[in-house]
Image (cartoon, helix red, strand yellow):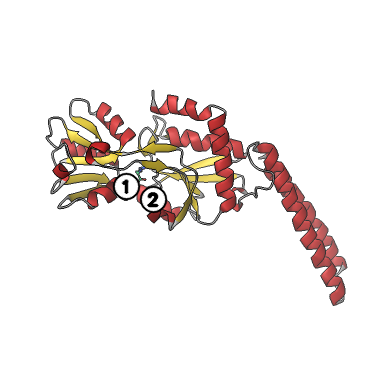
Amino acid sequence: MKKFFAVLLATVMTMSLLTACGSEAAETTTEETEAVETTEAEATETTEATETTETTETTEATEADVAVSDALADGVLTVGTNAEFPPFEYVDDNGEPDGFDIALIKAIGEKLGVTVEVENMEFASLISSIGSKIDVAIAGMTVTEERKNSVDFSNSYYEAVQYVILPEGSDIATADDLKDKAIGVQLGTTGDFIASDIEGASVSQYNKAVDAVNDLINGRVDCVIIDKNPALVFEGKFEGQVVAVDGAQFDFEPEEYAIAMPKGDTALVEQINAALEEIKADGTFDELVKTYIEE
Ligand code: ARG
């Protein structure tokens, strides 16, 4: 915030200076106009220098020459999530998005000196909203080559794997057993992509993961493929009705979660990575893991 106002002040001062020069130079020759332009260029340089200095002060881990992303210029980081994915994001008792990811991005916002505003939306809409409705997305989102065509990712902050949720007593136990089965997934997730590749499987896509689990309990699907930690939360929530099985048993590969950002905004990637590093180094990250994931 401090940084933002300093930059604003510098910009306003520069602009009034330019306006003054501009009116004096109202009836000028080409030579004089060029002189005004030069002043403008110098003024821009000054503004940039101010930004850099202030950023260094706010974010210790930020290198002196790291640029400031335009996405942060308004002092607000608008973050998209899909709060249907406990413990990473869920709606709390007051109707507000909370969870590990929400706490993490708020801590990042604090390091960067910006206010974090969270927009809860469908998971499948997140990527296309980045750069327009939202600045970034944090949603237990797995880094994939396909997604990298549309967005840039931060350094990864969590390792995951898909799990298989089964009704208590199910005899599904290997990758082979998943063939020709009715599989529930959350729409547009890596669980969805994995299920769609299974031979003969009929995949039911849900907007909310919990609806897939409810259909598993109702017998409408044979299993649900979803990330490890949410699977464990659902196993606890529907104790005695479902069990969560490690995807390694089904040959599923490990996945990495990262924050998704507009493609090409290198300044933003660097700023967010620097803040993430700091949060890991100062113990905040481990605290959040304890509070939200290992509780
Ligand atoms: N890790 C999976 C993916 O990236 C699932 C993420 C779902 N996240 C959520 N907030 N609903 O596709």
Tell me how many marks there are.
Answer: 2
- Is residue 36 shown left or right of residue 189? right
Residue at 24 percent across and 32 percent down: it is: 244
Q: Quadrant of residue 265?
A: bottom right
Is ligand 1 closer than 8 angstroms to the Cβ of mark 2? yes
The reply to whether the C-beta atoms of the residues labelled 1 and 2 are less than 8 Å apart is: yes
Q: Is residue 15 visible?
A: no
Q: Position of residue 69 (x, y in %)?
A: 61, 51
Q: Is residue 33 visible?
A: yes
The crowding category of the residue bearing disc 1, from other C-alpha atoms within 10 Å (few below 14, some 14 to 19, many at least 20), is many
- Near-viewer residue (270 or 212): 270
**Which image quarter holds the N terminus?**
top right
- Is residue 244 shown left or right of residue 79? left
**Which image quarter holds the C terminus?**
top left
Disc 1 from disc 2: Cα separation: 9 Å
Q: Position of residue 8 (x, y in %)?
A: 71, 49
Q: Which mark is residue 190?
A: 1
- Near-viewer residue (143 or 174): 174
Describe the element under mark 1 as helix, strand or loop: helix
Residue at 61 percent across and 45 percent down: it is: 75
Residue at 79 percent across and 67 percent down: it is: 37
- Is residue 111 shown left or right of residue 143? right
Q: Residue type at mark 1?
A: Thr
Look at mark 2 in the image and give the residue it sits on: 144
Say if 266 sits above or below 95 in the image.
Answer: below
Q: Residue type at mark 2?
A: Thr
